[in-house]
Image: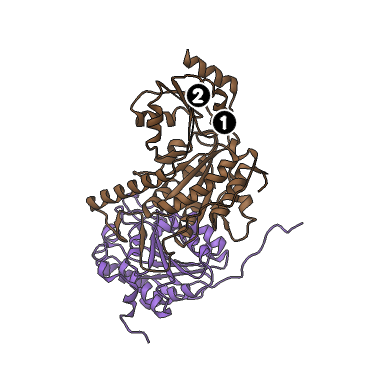
Chain colours: A purple, B brown
Amino acid sequence: MNNDTNFKRYLKLDLLPTPWCPGCGNGIVLKTICQAFDELDLPKNGTVVVSGIGCAGRSAGFFDLDSVHTAHGRAIPVAEGIKYANDALNVVVVSGDGDLIGIGGNHLFQAIRRNTNITVICYANEIYAMTGGQVSPITPHNTKTLTTPNGNPDRPADIQFLFKSNNCFFARTTAYHLNHMRKCIVEALKFKGFSFVEARTMCIVNYGRRLGYKNSNEMLLHYKEFYKINDYAEALAENEIGIIKSAPRSSDGFPSA
Amino acid sequence: MTKQLFQGNQAITMAAEVAGLKFFAGYPITPASEIIHELVNKKHIKVLQMEDEIASINAIIGASLAGLKAMTATSGPGFSLMQESIGLAHMMEVPLVIVNVQRVGPSTGMPTLPAQGDVIQCIHGSHGDYFPIVFYPNSVSELYKYTIMAFNAAEESLSPVILLSDGFISHLYETIIPDRNFDIKNRTRPPLGAGNRHFTGLSHEDSVPKTSDVDNYRRLITRLHEKQQLTAQRYNYYEYLECSKDTDTLLISYGALSRIAYYFKNDFALYRPIRLFPIVEEIKIIASRYKRILIMEMNTGQYAHEIERILHREVEFIPILGGCIDLNEIKQKLYEQRY
């Protein structure tokens, strides 16, 4: 049994507070990542954190590890460069949904194809929060944001199926389900191959507030009431969180003549 | 050592190996693809074909931070895609070598034909102020030598160094002596995984982002500028040929086009920058001896404007737009301007 505060060894405590707004869920994800590191006792020398741009991107600087804060959307190729250069390193990407699924979406898809042995933790707040609250690739249909004043005309990306294409690891969890989030991150870190944890987290200031939530606690309660845990299912329904079951890796292709 | 016949792009890969290249990421593009074709067959060099040039430059940034000497190679369209992350590499002080084998632009242009249209993009392609070191050789043996210099300058300056080439020189076959006897600069910074440093594109001080500390930002940019200038002075490469006849005209050219300038060596003094940027003192001293400065380049006057700015005097330029180098056309233009 680990000491409750042992996870703090992975943080630069002297840099706190973070730049995040009061009520932001990012701190919950950051803490849970560190708890998962602690549970696996990841060596501080030998673990590297890489992030992109946005609110979540700022979390890399708070790890008491070597960390790289890259350009917008480019955390995954930088992390892959690090991993292919030194396979002994544990390489963890921390970034947001806009960064990883929006601007960096192609890199995500290609990393799945390459099955690079890195772990990606996506702080999925469904919004471009740092720039004020614009629609993101996983903002739900019909939701009002600064750039969709009449409601989001598009359907949100459900990326879990991408991971099945190459037997990669995918889990969805939320900032309410703390033990589940920790379990997902631990399993993702242990997975040999490309792993991705979509951690739903709340943004009250540039998102929830405009949807009628009075505080971030109400958003947490929404996670509690809406999501049901369904681990190791073939696929996750809209209101389910969990780790998806791996499928055998496909090797279809044009045979050599 | 005996002379051997090599293609320009091949020479780049041989020199990169001598310089200590361990990691290459790139995306296929004419006329640079031979570089990845050659490297993929070399042992001890990790080669990745990425999904695009953006991923390529970011992968080599990661690999370089992880301790390996890293390089990518592309042409104009890919170089355009890389620009944002070139700025990132300057801000994070990551040593890299970026080879740009120029072709005719803008856009898809004429992919198989040479040009020199990316000269200004080398120094102003990314947003913000940064001060890259750029080499532009004009032969296969020089591609070999300056690839090694580019790696050394990258290590010394902790910055991405650009090696310019063009479809002409890179596809040229010449005999060279692949000399392995170079002084190679090695990495001084410990690789990732050895501490708690934070590399960031944000303005920063000692691994801590400083997003609104203006004084710190100004100190940072001044330091980066001085570092680049100092390193550039140690790589002070150019070719200067005085004219056998008395002439008042200095003809400046570089890269592929400078090969034809030798034809005029009896009429003009010739100057050829090899370290194209940053431009430091030597051109001022040489130019002060001549009344007229003529610049001939395969674009509409990109380097001429820079030279004008540095010399504080008017220069005449002869645009030879990309695609082909024709002696008669150049003769006509040179002597038209003269008389």
Measured as percent of width and height from the top left, residue A112 is found at 53, 62
Q: Is residue B32 above or below residue B91?
A: above
Question: The residue under label 1 is which amino acid type?
Answer: Arg
Q: Quadrant of the C terminus of chain A?
A: bottom right
Look at the numbered discs 1 and 2 and tell me whether their residues touch, using CB distance below 8 Å: no
Q: Nearer the viewer, mark 1 or mark 2?
A: 2
For mark 2, give the secondary structure: loop
Labels 1 and 2 in the same subunit: yes
Measured as percent of width and height from the top left, residue B159 is found at 42, 51
Residue marked by disc 2: B243
> Looking at the image, which is closer to me, B291 or B201?
B291
Tell me the chain of label 1: B
Which residue is drawn at the image coordinates 43% and 68% (left, top)?
Answer: B193
Measured as percent of width and height from the top left, residue A197 is found at 44, 68
Of all residues shown, which one is farthest toward the bottom?
A1
> Which label is found at residue B259?
1
